[in-house]
Image (spheres, grey):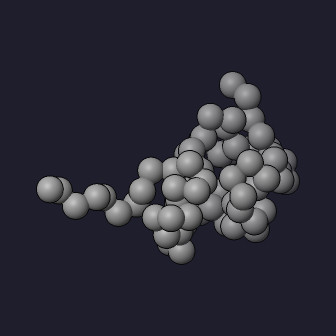
Amino acid sequence: MRYMSIPEAALLWRLSPEQLRKNCETHQLVGAVRFGYRWLIPADARRPILADDTPIQSAARGLRPIIPAPAS
């Protein structure tokens, strides 16, 4: 399995390294492991959806909308 570091994931997902580090420490990133003083994140991990993400921001980042479309 391939892993990426926090700075690599931060660039890929357009998040701050501090936010990613906090997500790793609180086990919100599935599969993240601590190796010495570094966190390693699986290369196929999904970007965490933050509380301040709006549907427009999520769509711009290539994520599914967090608010479902109304049924017609």
Place of residue 56 in the rendered image (x, y in percent of width and height, measured from the top left): 50, 64
Could you tell me which quadrant the N terminus lies in? top right
Image quadrant where residue 61 sits: bottom right
Q: Nearer the viewer, residue 67 or 48?
A: 67
For the question of whether residue 20 can be seen, the reply is yes
Q: Residue 24: give x, y in percent of width and height.
A: 65, 57
Name the outermost residue toward the left. 72
- Asked whether, in this view, residue 11 is left or right of residue 32, the answer is right
Residue 32 shown left or right of residue 3 in the figure: left
Identified at 49% across, 69% down, the residue is: 54
Q: Residue at x 73, y 28 (%)?
A: 2
Q: Position of residue 4 (x, y in %)?
A: 77, 40
Determine which quarter of the picture holds residue 52: bottom right
Residue 58 image point, x, y percent: 53, 59
Whether residue 51 is situated above or below residue 33 in the rendered picture: below
**Is 14 in front, or is 41?**
14
Q: Indicate whether 18 appears above or below 60.
A: below
In what quadrant of the picture does the C terminus appear? bottom left
In this orientation, which residue lies closer to the viewer: 35 or 50? Answer: 50
Residue that lies at the very extreme toward the front in this rendered image: 72
Q: Say above or below: 56 vs 4.
A: below
